Image (spheres, rainbow, N blue to C red):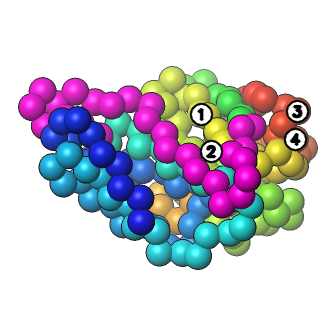
Amino acid sequence: KIILYFDEYVTLENPFEKLTYSPVPKTNPTSEGKLRTITIKIKDTLEANTTYSIDFGDAIKDINESNILKNFNYAFSTGDYIDSAYLTGKVTVAETGLIDSAMVAVLHNNLDDSAVAKLKPRYFARLKGDGSFLFRNIKPGAYNLFAIKDQNGDKKYDQPSELIAFLNQTITVGVDTAATL
């Protein structure tokens, strides 16, 4: 259980939609805001020597003025250090040249090209309004990078109507720091 304490009353809006957990858990944690605290209850067993990150997006607001706590991220490790590698990028729909901020970027450490359809990704990030994404606190290594319009919320490319973008090569996090899809 993780309890975050604030110096004013806060609310947690749409945590199922707005909170991003990395690495992606098998079972989503539960989260609630109450008075001056936000509580996250993790249901999975945590892996050894792994950095975990919770990105709150724009889910935390103070109750009185509805000010949003932007870009708040909570990271912790089950090992001796917190991974600090990152990957940033941008996604544009090739057909229209426009941005589709309903898409998500996903990183798979299983390098099989069908992993995007069969497995949950190791990491995922929501696109911002300008089509950009940011993965932070990730373990260095080789990954396949995809962007999908995840219509059913399972973080997989498993419906013919879902849009997909991918790189033709693996990306090495810790060396490569940016990509465009």
Residue type, numbered disc 2:
Ala
Determine which residue is flagged by label 4: 172
Asked if the residues shown at circle 3 and circle 4 are in contact, with their CB atoms under 8 angstroms apart, the answer is: yes
What is the distance, in whole Å, between disc 2 and disc 1 at their CAs? 7 Å
Determine which residue is flagged by label 3: 175
Mark toward the start of the polypeptide (2 vs 1)? 2
Of residues 168 and 125, the one drawn nearer to the viewer in this rendering: 125
What is the distance, in whole Å, between disc 4 and disc 1 at their CAs? 17 Å
Q: Residues within 10 Å of mark 3 (few under 14, many from 20)?
A: few
Magenta highlight range: 60-85
What is the distance, in whole Å, between disc 1 and disc 3 at their CAs? 17 Å
The residue located at (64%, 28%) in the rendering is: 90
Residue found at the very far left of the displayed protein: 64
Mark 1: secondary structure: strand
Answer yes or no: is residue 160 visible. no
Mark toward the start of the polypeptide (1 vs 3)? 1
Determine the image quadrant of residue 156. bottom right
Horizontal and vertical percent position of residue 44: 54, 75
Of residues 37 and 117, the one drawn nearer to the viewer in this rendering: 37
Of residues 55 and 167, the one drawn nearer to the viewer in this rendering: 55
Q: Which mark is residue 105?
A: 2
Query: Which one is closest to the eye, mark 2 or mark 4?
Result: 4
Mark 3: secondary structure: loop
